[in-house]
Image (cartoon, grey):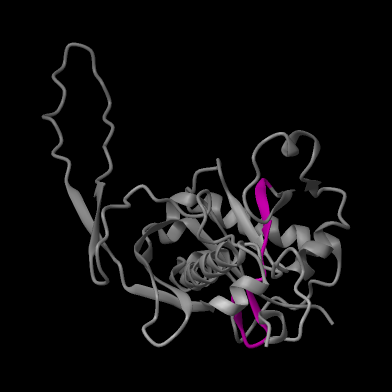
Amino acid sequence: MSLENLIPSVWAARLLANLHKALVYAQPGVVNRDFEGEIRQKGDNVRITAMSAVSVGDYIKDAPIADPELLTDAQTVLLINRAKYFHFQIDDVDRVQQNPDAMDEAMREAAFALADEADQFVASLHTQAAAANLIGSDGDPVDDLDTPDKAYEYLVDLDVRLTEANTPRFGRYVVVPAWYLGLLRKDDRFVRSGTALGEKALRNGEIGMAAGMTVLESNNVPKSGSVYKIIAGYAGAITYAEQIAQVEAYRPEKRFADAVKGLHLYGAKVIRPNGIAVMSAVRPA
Protein backbone atom coordinates (compact mmCIF):
# COMPACT_ATOMS: atom_id res chain seq x y z
CA MET A 1 0.00 0.00 0.00
CA SER A 2 1.41 3.37 -0.96
CA LEU A 3 2.11 6.05 1.61
CA GLU A 4 -0.52 8.35 0.06
CA ASN A 5 -3.26 5.81 0.83
CA LEU A 6 -2.54 5.61 4.55
CA ILE A 7 -4.61 8.71 5.30
CA PRO A 8 -7.29 9.37 2.64
CA SER A 9 -7.12 13.16 2.79
CA VAL A 10 -5.89 15.89 0.54
CA TRP A 11 -3.47 18.11 2.42
CA ALA A 12 -3.27 21.81 1.56
CA ALA A 13 0.08 23.27 0.66
CA ARG A 14 -0.14 25.52 3.71
CA LEU A 15 -1.24 24.58 7.19
CA LEU A 16 -4.41 26.29 8.38
CA ALA A 17 -3.50 28.78 11.07
CA ASN A 18 -5.75 28.87 14.12
CA LEU A 19 -7.69 31.97 15.11
CA HIS A 20 -6.00 33.46 18.13
CA LYS A 21 -6.89 36.02 20.74
CA ALA A 22 -4.76 39.14 20.98
CA LEU A 23 -2.49 38.72 23.98
CA VAL A 24 -2.57 41.97 25.93
CA TYR A 25 -2.06 41.84 29.68
CA ALA A 26 1.44 40.33 29.85
CA GLN A 27 3.01 42.56 27.20
CA PRO A 28 5.41 45.47 27.81
CA GLY A 29 3.53 48.72 28.28
CA VAL A 30 0.84 46.98 30.31
CA VAL A 31 3.28 45.30 32.72
CA ASN A 32 6.94 46.06 33.33
CA ARG A 33 9.87 43.68 33.28
CA ASP A 34 12.26 45.97 35.12
CA PHE A 35 13.14 43.35 37.71
CA GLU A 36 13.40 40.31 35.48
CA GLY A 37 16.31 38.21 36.62
CA GLU A 38 17.76 34.85 35.77
CA ILE A 39 15.08 32.23 36.42
CA ARG A 40 16.05 28.58 36.62
CA GLN A 41 13.16 26.81 38.31
CA LYS A 42 9.71 27.18 39.82
CA GLY A 43 10.02 28.72 43.26
CA ASP A 44 12.80 31.15 42.33
CA ASN A 45 12.49 34.67 43.69
CA VAL A 46 13.01 38.03 42.01
CA ARG A 47 13.77 40.67 44.65
CA ILE A 48 12.38 44.15 44.04
CA THR A 49 13.85 47.09 45.98
CA ALA A 50 11.95 50.36 46.47
CA MET A 51 13.40 53.51 48.06
CA SER A 52 11.53 55.62 50.60
CA ALA A 53 10.26 59.08 49.65
CA VAL A 54 12.52 62.14 49.92
CA SER A 55 11.39 65.00 52.17
CA VAL A 56 11.62 68.67 51.16
CA GLY A 57 12.36 71.48 53.62
CA ASP A 58 12.26 75.28 53.61
CA TYR A 59 15.57 76.99 52.92
CA ILE A 60 16.40 80.07 55.01
CA LYS A 61 19.27 82.30 53.99
CA ASP A 62 22.31 82.15 56.31
CA ALA A 63 20.74 79.35 58.33
CA PRO A 64 22.01 75.76 58.38
CA ILE A 65 19.95 73.13 56.64
CA ALA A 66 18.87 69.94 58.38
CA ASP A 67 21.09 66.90 58.64
CA PRO A 68 20.88 64.55 55.65
CA GLU A 69 17.86 62.33 55.69
CA LEU A 70 18.53 58.62 55.88
CA LEU A 71 16.73 56.88 53.04
CA THR A 72 15.58 53.33 53.59
CA ASP A 73 14.69 50.63 51.15
CA ALA A 74 12.03 47.98 51.26
CA GLN A 75 12.16 44.70 49.41
CA THR A 76 9.26 42.93 47.76
CA VAL A 77 9.64 39.37 46.52
CA LEU A 78 8.24 38.32 43.15
CA LEU A 79 7.74 34.58 43.35
CA ILE A 80 8.08 32.55 40.17
CA ASN A 81 5.14 30.34 41.01
CA ARG A 82 3.75 29.43 37.59
CA ALA A 83 5.09 26.52 35.54
CA LYS A 84 3.37 25.47 32.32
CA TYR A 85 4.53 22.96 29.73
CA PHE A 86 3.69 21.73 26.26
CA HIS A 87 4.45 18.30 24.87
CA PHE A 88 3.45 17.11 21.40
CA GLN A 89 4.54 14.80 18.64
CA ILE A 90 4.11 14.74 14.88
CA ASP A 91 4.06 11.33 13.23
CA ASP A 92 6.50 10.85 10.36
CA VAL A 93 3.67 9.78 8.06
CA ASP A 94 1.67 12.92 8.82
CA ARG A 95 4.73 15.10 8.37
CA VAL A 96 5.45 13.62 4.96
CA GLN A 97 1.88 14.13 3.77
CA GLN A 98 1.64 17.69 5.13
CA ASN A 99 4.74 19.72 4.44
CA PRO A 100 8.07 20.60 6.05
CA ASP A 101 6.46 23.54 7.87
CA ALA A 102 4.36 21.30 10.12
CA MET A 103 6.80 21.44 13.04
CA ASP A 104 7.23 25.23 12.76
CA GLU A 105 3.48 25.74 12.85
CA ALA A 106 3.12 23.39 15.81
CA MET A 107 5.78 25.35 17.70
CA ARG A 108 3.94 28.60 17.01
CA GLU A 109 0.76 27.02 18.39
CA ALA A 110 2.63 25.88 21.50
CA ALA A 111 4.12 29.35 22.03
CA PHE A 112 0.71 30.96 21.74
CA ALA A 113 -0.84 28.50 24.19
CA LEU A 114 1.83 29.30 26.79
CA ALA A 115 1.50 33.05 26.26
CA ASP A 116 -2.29 32.87 26.53
CA GLU A 117 -2.02 31.19 29.93
CA ALA A 118 0.34 33.93 31.13
CA ASP A 119 -1.96 36.64 29.75
CA GLN A 120 -4.94 35.31 31.70
CA PHE A 121 -2.84 34.98 34.86
CA VAL A 122 -1.72 38.62 34.74
CA ALA A 123 -5.32 39.73 34.10
CA SER A 124 -6.43 37.86 37.24
CA LEU A 125 -4.29 40.17 39.41
CA HIS A 126 -7.00 42.84 39.20
CA THR A 127 -8.14 41.63 42.61
CA GLN A 128 -5.12 43.39 44.15
CA ALA A 129 -6.13 46.89 43.03
CA ALA A 130 -6.48 49.49 45.79
CA ALA A 131 -9.98 49.61 47.27
CA ALA A 132 -10.28 53.33 46.50
CA ASN A 133 -9.79 52.56 42.81
CA LEU A 134 -12.77 50.24 42.43
CA ILE A 135 -15.94 51.21 40.58
CA GLY A 136 -18.77 48.75 41.12
CA SER A 137 -18.46 45.23 42.50
CA ASP A 138 -19.67 41.69 41.84
CA GLY A 139 -22.73 42.34 43.96
CA ASP A 140 -23.37 45.85 42.64
CA PRO A 141 -21.88 46.14 39.15
CA VAL A 142 -22.21 49.02 36.72
CA ASP A 143 -25.32 48.08 34.75
CA ASP A 144 -26.20 51.19 32.76
CA LEU A 145 -23.68 50.95 29.93
CA ASP A 146 -26.40 51.27 27.35
CA THR A 147 -25.12 54.29 25.41
CA PRO A 148 -21.76 55.36 23.94
CA ASP A 149 -21.76 58.42 26.18
CA LYS A 150 -21.91 56.32 29.33
CA ALA A 151 -19.24 53.92 28.10
CA TYR A 152 -16.88 56.85 27.53
CA GLU A 153 -17.76 58.62 30.78
CA TYR A 154 -17.06 55.56 32.90
CA LEU A 155 -13.56 55.46 31.39
CA VAL A 156 -13.19 59.07 32.51
CA ASP A 157 -14.13 57.92 36.01
CA LEU A 158 -11.43 55.23 35.91
CA ASP A 159 -8.90 57.81 34.76
CA VAL A 160 -9.89 60.13 37.62
CA ARG A 161 -9.34 57.33 40.15
CA LEU A 162 -5.83 56.83 38.78
CA THR A 163 -5.07 60.55 38.93
CA GLU A 164 -6.31 60.82 42.51
CA ALA A 165 -3.96 57.94 43.38
CA ASN A 166 -0.98 59.90 41.90
CA THR A 167 -0.56 57.46 39.03
CA PRO A 168 1.75 58.84 36.32
CA ARG A 169 -0.17 60.30 33.42
CA PHE A 170 2.13 58.91 30.73
CA GLY A 171 1.44 55.40 29.50
CA ARG A 172 -1.99 54.82 30.98
CA TYR A 173 -4.08 52.07 29.42
CA VAL A 174 -7.48 50.44 29.75
CA VAL A 175 -8.37 46.95 28.51
CA VAL A 176 -11.96 46.39 27.35
CA PRO A 177 -13.93 43.49 25.86
CA ALA A 178 -15.23 43.66 22.28
CA TRP A 179 -18.75 44.76 23.25
CA TYR A 180 -17.42 47.72 25.24
CA LEU A 181 -15.19 48.77 22.36
CA GLY A 182 -18.24 48.63 20.10
CA LEU A 183 -19.90 51.28 22.26
CA LEU A 184 -16.79 53.49 22.32
CA ARG A 185 -16.54 53.44 18.55
CA LYS A 186 -19.92 55.14 18.36
CA ASP A 187 -18.67 58.08 20.44
CA ASP A 188 -17.01 60.96 18.55
CA ARG A 189 -14.56 61.49 21.41
CA PHE A 190 -12.96 58.09 20.81
CA VAL A 191 -9.74 58.48 18.78
CA ARG A 192 -9.18 55.47 16.57
CA SER A 193 -5.76 54.00 15.84
CA GLY A 194 -4.64 55.24 12.46
CA THR A 195 -3.42 58.64 11.29
CA ALA A 196 -0.95 59.81 13.94
CA LEU A 197 -1.43 56.74 16.14
CA GLY A 198 -0.87 54.43 13.22
CA GLU A 199 2.58 55.88 12.64
CA LYS A 200 3.99 54.32 15.78
CA ALA A 201 4.35 50.68 16.72
CA LEU A 202 1.09 49.62 18.35
CA ARG A 203 0.81 47.25 21.26
CA ASN A 204 -1.13 44.03 20.83
CA GLY A 205 -4.84 44.76 20.94
CA GLU A 206 -4.33 48.54 20.77
CA ILE A 207 -7.35 50.19 19.20
CA GLY A 208 -7.23 53.89 20.01
CA MET A 209 -7.42 56.53 22.75
CA ALA A 210 -10.21 57.50 25.14
CA ALA A 211 -10.26 59.62 28.29
CA GLY A 212 -6.49 60.09 28.11
CA MET A 213 -5.79 56.34 28.08
CA THR A 214 -4.71 53.92 25.38
CA VAL A 215 -7.61 51.54 24.72
CA LEU A 216 -6.75 47.88 24.21
CA GLU A 217 -9.17 45.10 23.32
CA SER A 218 -8.92 41.57 24.67
CA ASN A 219 -10.97 38.40 24.88
CA ASN A 220 -9.11 37.67 28.12
CA VAL A 221 -10.92 40.39 30.08
CA PRO A 222 -11.66 38.63 33.40
CA LYS A 223 -15.24 37.72 34.27
CA SER A 224 -16.91 36.81 37.53
CA GLY A 225 -20.14 35.20 36.40
CA SER A 226 -21.65 37.83 34.13
CA VAL A 227 -19.55 40.67 35.57
CA TYR A 228 -16.61 41.89 33.46
CA LYS A 229 -13.53 43.36 35.14
CA ILE A 230 -12.36 46.33 33.08
CA ILE A 231 -8.83 47.16 34.16
CA ALA A 232 -7.07 50.50 33.76
CA GLY A 233 -3.58 51.35 34.92
CA TYR A 234 0.02 51.95 33.93
CA ALA A 235 2.97 49.63 33.39
CA GLY A 236 4.65 50.47 36.70
CA ALA A 237 1.84 48.83 38.68
CA ILE A 238 2.52 45.19 37.78
CA THR A 239 5.88 43.54 37.33
CA TYR A 240 6.25 40.34 35.34
CA ALA A 241 9.16 37.95 34.89
CA GLU A 242 9.41 34.85 32.73
CA GLN A 243 11.82 32.32 31.31
CA ILE A 244 11.51 29.52 28.77
CA ALA A 245 13.45 27.14 30.96
CA GLN A 246 13.72 24.19 28.62
CA VAL A 247 12.84 23.13 25.10
CA GLU A 248 13.75 19.58 24.12
CA ALA A 249 13.28 17.77 20.82
CA TYR A 250 13.55 14.00 20.71
CA ARG A 251 12.44 10.81 18.94
CA PRO A 252 9.96 8.80 21.10
CA GLU A 253 11.21 5.25 21.62
CA LYS A 254 7.98 3.55 20.51
CA ARG A 255 6.95 5.95 17.74
CA PHE A 256 8.13 6.99 14.30
CA ALA A 257 7.69 10.64 15.14
CA ASP A 258 9.34 13.86 16.18
CA ALA A 259 8.40 15.12 19.63
CA VAL A 260 9.03 18.40 21.41
CA LYS A 261 8.45 19.47 25.00
CA GLY A 262 9.00 22.82 26.63
CA LEU A 263 8.69 24.46 30.05
CA HIS A 264 7.62 28.07 30.70
CA LEU A 265 8.32 29.59 34.12
CA TYR A 266 6.86 32.93 35.12
CA GLY A 267 5.40 35.08 37.85
CA ALA A 268 3.74 38.47 38.24
CA LYS A 269 3.02 40.76 41.17
CA VAL A 270 1.14 43.99 41.76
CA ILE A 271 3.78 46.26 43.28
CA ARG A 272 1.74 49.49 43.18
CA PRO A 273 -1.94 48.73 43.94
CA ASN A 274 -2.78 52.42 43.52
CA GLY A 275 -1.66 52.17 39.90
CA ILE A 276 -4.62 49.97 38.91
CA ALA A 277 -8.30 50.90 38.73
CA VAL A 278 -11.03 48.32 38.07
CA MET A 279 -14.62 48.69 36.99
CA SER A 280 -17.03 45.79 37.49
CA ALA A 281 -19.66 45.98 34.76
CA VAL A 282 -22.27 43.86 33.03
CA ARG A 283 -22.92 43.84 29.32
CA PRO A 284 -26.05 45.73 28.34
CA ALA A 285 -28.94 43.61 27.11
Q: Nearer the viewer, residue 124 or 255?
A: 255
Q: Position of residue 119 (x, y in %)?
A: 52, 67
Q: Nearer the viewer, residue 260 or 42?
A: 260
Q: Position of residue 266 (x, y in %)?
A: 37, 65
Q: Is residue 9 left or right of residue 268?
A: right
Q: Position of residue 74 (x, y in %)?
A: 20, 53
Seen as rendered, the residue at the extreme front is: 1
Q: Is residue 253 left or right of residue 279?
A: left
- Tell me where residue 84 sits by quadrant: bottom left
- In the rendered image, residue 46 lying in the magenta stretch gets the answer no
What residue appears at the point 63 percent right and 54 percent down from the top-left corner? 204
What residue appears at the point 77 percent right and 58 percent down from the top-left corner? 152
Which residues are drawn in magenta? 212-229
- In the rendered image, residue 213 lying in the magenta stretch gets the answer yes
Q: Is residue 144 left or right of residue 159?
A: right
Q: Is residue 72 left or right of residue 97?
A: left
Q: Is residue 168 above or below residue 244?
A: above
Which quarter of the figure is the N terminus placed in? Answer: bottom right
Seen as rendered, the residue at the extreme left is: 67
What residue appears at the point 36 percent right and 74 percent down from the top-left corner? 83
Number of labelled discs? 0
Q: Nearer the viewer, residue 115 or 223?
A: 115
Seen as rendered, the residue at the extreme top is: 62
Residue 157 visible somewhere in the drawing: yes
Q: Position of residue 136 (x, y in %)?
A: 62, 75
Residue 220 visible somewhere in the drawing: no
Q: Is residue 207 above or below residue 142?
A: above
What residue appears at the point 43 percent right and 70 percent down from the top-left corner? 128
Which quarter of the figure is the C terminus placed in? Answer: bottom right
